Amino acid sequence: MSGPTIDVPMLLAQLFNGLLLQLPLYLVWLAGIGLALIRRQRHPRASLLALIGIGMLLASSVLSTIVSFGLPLLYEAGAVRGGVAMLANLLGVCRIVFSVIEAIGCGLLLAAAFSGRALQPVPEKASEL
């Protein structure tokens, strides 16, 4: 007697829908990658930081979507042992890992935004603001 099987077409359709819901965000990130590549000659450090940061955010988002759809289906198919508690623990650990990756990616984007800036003199009077 074999255990439950994974409905691959259904899994792919759900995964595609999950990724499609994030398409506006992916388009913004792709535009950011394009801008960083275009500006890399003028701002090499900022562009590199931006590319790494956006890459981390994009990878984390795609992998997080795959894991959030895939792990429950693997559990249903019997590939994840230990019951619902184990599944919840696995999903929780994955969420923590993805949150750390996203925090680092955002930090790199902040570093890119503020890197390579010339120091501006601080105004002495409020009227100069």
Image: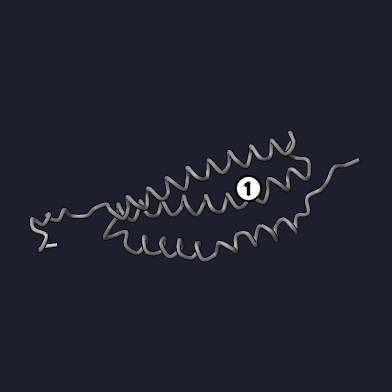
Against 97, residue 61 (above or below) is: below
Question: Which residue, given by chain and number where applicable, does mark 1 sit on?
Answer: 67
Q: Nearer the viewer, residue 43 or 105?
A: 105
Q: Nearer the viewer, residue 85 or 20?
A: 85
What residue is at 70 percent from the left and 36 percent from the top? 85
- The residue furthest front is 126
* Quadrant in which residue 20 is drawn: bottom right
* Quadrant in which residue 83 is drawn: top right
Which SS class for mark 1?
helix
Image side of residue 104 versus residue 92, left or right: left
What residue is at 16 percent from the left and 53 percent from the top? 119
- The residue furthest top is 82
Three-letter amino acid code of the residue under disc 1: Val
Where residue 22 sits: x, y (%)?
Answer: 55, 61
Q: Nearer the viewer, residue 125 or 79?
A: 125
Look at the image and name its color scheme. Answer: one colour
Image side of residue 104 versus residue 118, left or right: right
Q: How many marks?
A: 1
The C terminus lies in quadrant: bottom left
What residue is at 83 percent from the left and 46 percent from the top? 4
The N terminus lies in quadrant: top right
Where residue 89 sits: x, y (%)?
Answer: 64, 37
Q: Nearer the viewer, residue 115 or 92?
A: 92
What residue is at 45 percent from the left and 61 percent from the top? 29
Rate crowding at label 1 as few (under 14), some (14 to 19) or many (20 or more) other CA atoms within 10 Å.
some
Image side of residue 58 versus residue 13, left or right: left
Where residue 79 sits: x, y (%)?
Answer: 75, 40
